[in-house]
Image (cartoon, rainbow, N blue to C red):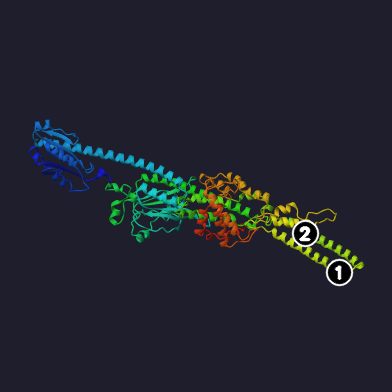
Amino acid sequence: MDVLNRNIERLVYITDRAAGFVQVPPEDQYRLERGQGPGELERLLGAGNGVARHTVIFAGFDEYGQLDDMLSRYPFVDLSYRFILFGTEKEIEGFDIAHYHSIAGVRTSPLSAAECRITLRTTMLSIEELYTSKVMQQQYLNALNDTRKDQVDLIDIGRALSTEKDQNNLLRMILKLSKRITGADAGSIYLVEEDEAGNKRLRFKYSHTFSRTIPLEEFVMVMDKKSIAGYVAVTGEVLNIPNAYDLPDAAPYSYNSSFDKKNNYICRSMLVVPMRNHVDEIIGVIQLINSKENIDNRPDMEDEAFSIRLERPEDFDKYVVTFNEKYNSLLEAVAGQAAIAIENNRMIEQIQNQFEEFVKASVTAIESRDPATSGHSFRVAAICKEMARAINESKAGELGPVTFSENDIRELEYAALLHDFGKVYIDLAVFKKAKKLYPKDLENLILRLDYLYRFLELQYSMRETELLHRLAKEDAPDAVEGLLEERHESLSRIREIRDSIVALNEPSVVAENIEEKLNNLCSEIGQIGCVSVDGDHMEVISDNDRENLKIKRGSLNETERKEIESHVVHTYTFVSKIPWPPEYRRIPEIALRHHEKLDGTGYPDGIKGKDGMLIQSRIMAVADIYDALVASDRPYKKAMPMEKVITILKEEANRNILDKDLVDLFIEKRIYEKVSKDSFKDIQNGGRN
């Protein structure tokens, strides 16, 4: 509001008590009023709102206090005043007032007409000079405050834009801050993009109008000079338009008023600026509409953009003004910061996507070494994310206070994807070992058992020949029958032993006490005895065979298990070399601990209890074991029914191997239904179920 150009009314007010001391000549430039005191004067001042009054008051000494108290409540821009006081010498001597700034003169005698005219003019002149000085001082202070506020806003904008990573939040923030600086009622952001043919176009990306609730609908428009936003995007010029409905005839652009008609809105002033990145390319446009001004100086409307509501046509006439020229360069600075923030956000997102694809490609390459584990890491990562989100929804128990941010969930996902990365260092033969014995070892063992069978068969044939020679000399039919029966039983037993060995070679999921059974078989074979073709004693079941066949669970012996277990250390060593940002710094430790158990029997460090492990590692332990149990294509086992899997998980939790709270959550929230056991199985072929 331009205070200096307000209408000014010059008022002369004479109290009844001072009337005998004053002879005010009638003049057109003054409004002359007379009254009894403060009440009458206050009534007169309230009769003309919106007008600045310069007032000279002629009053008695004893009236000054009340009148000044009442008048001092008015803002100086609405009322500037000075007193001419009359009284006796005694009243003057006894006059004691703390503030004399509003007293222009003191008289003990009446004023003549000439004296009154000069006193009135000089007093009114001093009022006007003081008014002008104060207004200019206030405007200067307001300008300084605006400049300071603009600088603070620019700093705040830079700080806010540099920390926001979400693209949609970033656009909302850019528009909100731009509107706040300029007092705009509405605004939109357009981003430049290319179609498949490489042609540039503008995408209407985000919009907000304070005075209307208008749903956002994205659309794409041609990037040319015909539209206002397109003109700015093509030319890079700033447009400050006083009235969108009154554009210059020579303007190549036009305003589409269909939006206004549809939403009962009036677009008056516009400020449209290009967003330039660090290489001076225009990547978008900020378009602001209807700059608003708090002409009533109401404290609750200081933030014009988000306090003044344009509801009726007269509101547009009253509050909407042309955007101040200073906003041209100021908003260009904001747009520059916004463009850099958007570009940085795009680059970060691109790097993020590239890194994600690198991680997924690496995991796929590792899992392609063994089709049996195809998709395992992806399923574990998916389960971990579902459990983290379920924990966020949990409000009770030990998991109640635990929350995961989106960064925390992403960190857990990466750790889960990479948790088996160290298996690339493991001997592929060990990694793919499906049975307790390697195929070649089993084949050799079967050959030795077949040799034992043939060796024993030959022994019986020799005994039969010898017995037949004896029968030629003596009669012993019972001996022949007994030998044939013994032969049948012995050879049948060799076949049974062979079948038992083959059965023992099959790995089991649950630990079994099979060592005694194996020892009995070895002892039985040892009693039979076997001689090689060279006549030497031959060991049918070697020490290596015994070591592997007595494995209680799975297909790996102790040495092989240690080698497999070392994959977590290899994973940790590799993943630790990646320069993770601070929000992902725990990935190596999370991946390292996913095979630790709460009872201290896990690896690599045998950590006992929850305190030594991050909850992320405990989550991954549940997901990893679940997927191993439910997977249908592991080499050493068949898929288990879900009821059996859940029973095993509960047993592991009750034995303090897995975190019981997490297992209960996994079962209660039916996480196992949210990630299919067969998902991601064709990941190595470039597809995903």
Q: Nearer the viewer, residue 16 or 417?
A: 417
Question: Residue at position x 86%, y 63% from top?
Answer: 463
* Furthest-left residue in this view: 20
Q: Nearer the viewer, residue 635 or 104?
A: 635
Q: Answer with the quarter of the image where residue 24 lies.
A: top left
Q: Position of residue 450 (x, y in %)?
A: 78, 60
Q: Position of residue 378 (x, y in %)?
A: 57, 55
Provide the secondary structure element on which disc 1 rests: helix
Q: Is residue 181 visible?
A: yes
* Screen quadrant of the C terminus: bottom right
Sort mark 2 into few (<14), some (14-19) or many (20+) by Cα contacts within 10 Å: many
Left or right, 43 with respect to 426, comes to left
Q: Nearer the viewer, residue 443 or 544?
A: 544
Which circle marks residue 477 in the picture? 1
Judged by depth in the image, the label closer to the viewer, 2 or 1, is 1
In the rendered image, the vertical position of residue 313 relative to residue 614, given as above or below: below
Left or right, 358 with respect to 218, comes to right
Q: Position of residue 601 (x, y in %)?
A: 59, 49
Check contact, mark 2 vs mark 1: CB within 8 A: no
For the image shown, how many numbered marks are present on the structure? 2
Mark 2 / mark 1, whichever is N-terminal: 2
Amino acid bearing label 2: Leu
Provide the secondary structure element on which disc 2 rests: helix
Q: Answer with the quarter of the image where residue 675 lies.
A: bottom right
Which circle marks residue 356 in the picture? none
Amino acid bearing label 1: Pro
Left or right, 523 with respect to 304, comes to right
Q: Position of residue 168 (x, y in %)?
A: 45, 53
Sort mark 1 into few (<14), some (14-19) or many (20+) by Cα contacts within 10 Å: few
- Which residue position holds label 2? 449
From mark 2 to mark 1, how far is it between C-alphas?
32 Å
Q: Answer with the quarter of the image where residue 505 lies.
A: bottom right
